[in-house]
Amino acid sequence: MREVEIKAQVKDLRAAEGKLLELGGKISSSVVQADRIFLQNGVKMEQVTVNTPVLRIRKQDPGKILLTYKHILGEELDKQEHEVEISDADEMEKILKFSGYYEIVRFTKRRRKCKIDGYTICLDEVEGLGDFIEIEKLFPDGDGSTALTTGSEISGQAAQAELFSFLKKLGAEEADKVLQGYDVLIYNKKNPKS
């Protein structure tokens, strides 16, 4: 799958939740997600670019474990994604390490979801970072250049602009936009550049 997303940091997650409810959204119960991000040996976070494989093991209550493969297609938040449920995170970590991957960062967030107009909206409380709203759209493989709502050809950047216009309805402003994933934000916070 191709995942195009946009996110913004928010000061008042409850206000955004209220706007989603006004738009007719139904917000799920919160789920805790503990993510561990893996890169190939020798690859540093700042070297992750287009087509660099990034693997994630996610533990999510109640007892669900997912392995996700991602790589950037163009913009950082425009990614190819494949995901499968697994039964044992520790064994999967051993397989990844034997396959030449190492853990680069880990983080935990509390997430609630809502679906409106074909978008998945996530209300995220990320430990150590703050509160965010993320809007994403998944495309089937081979359909990455199709527009989200118009059916015409569109770039990942244009798709993100469309997603951000919806995000504005929830109170986000241009200055709130975040162009990196939580993994990169956490990594940069823990490893500040001199």
Image: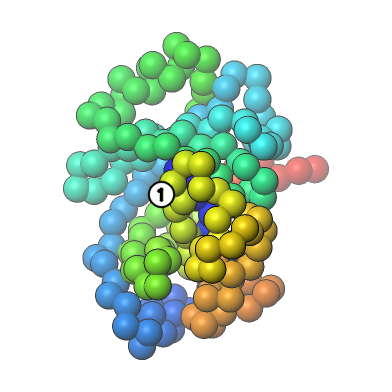
- Residue at x 45% of width, y 11% of height: 98
- Residue at x 56% of width, y 30% of height: 53
- Residue at x 34% of width, y 23% of height: 92
The answer to which image quadrant residue 57 occupies is top left
Residue situated furthest right in the rendering: 194
Quick check: 187 left or right of 20?
right
- Residue at x 34% of width, y 64% of height: 113
58 or 4, which is in the foreground? Answer: 4
The answer to which image quadrant residue 43 occupies is top right
x then y, percent, for residue 181: 56, 50
x then y, percent, for residue 67: 37, 33
Using the image, determine if residue 86 lies above or below residue 178. Answer: above
Quarter of the figure that contains the C terminus: top right
The answer, for residue 152, to whether it is visible in the render is: yes
Picture colour scheme: rainbow
Residue situated furthest top in the rendering: 98
Using the image, determine if residue 33 lies above or below residue 121. Answer: above
Quick check: 128 left or right of 34?
right
Name the kind of residue labelled 1 in the image.
Thr
Residue situated furthest bottom in the rendering: 22
x then y, percent, for residue 164: 58, 71
**Mark 1, other Cα within 10 Å: few <14 / some 14–19 / many ≥20:** some
55 or 120, which is in the foreground? Answer: 120
Label 1: which secondary element: strand
- Name the residue tied to disc 1: 108
x then y, percent, for residue 15: 43, 84
Quick check: 94 left or right of 175?
left
The answer, for residue 36, to whether it is visible in the render is: no
Quarter of the figure that contains the N terminus: top left
Quick check: 114 left or right of 193?
left
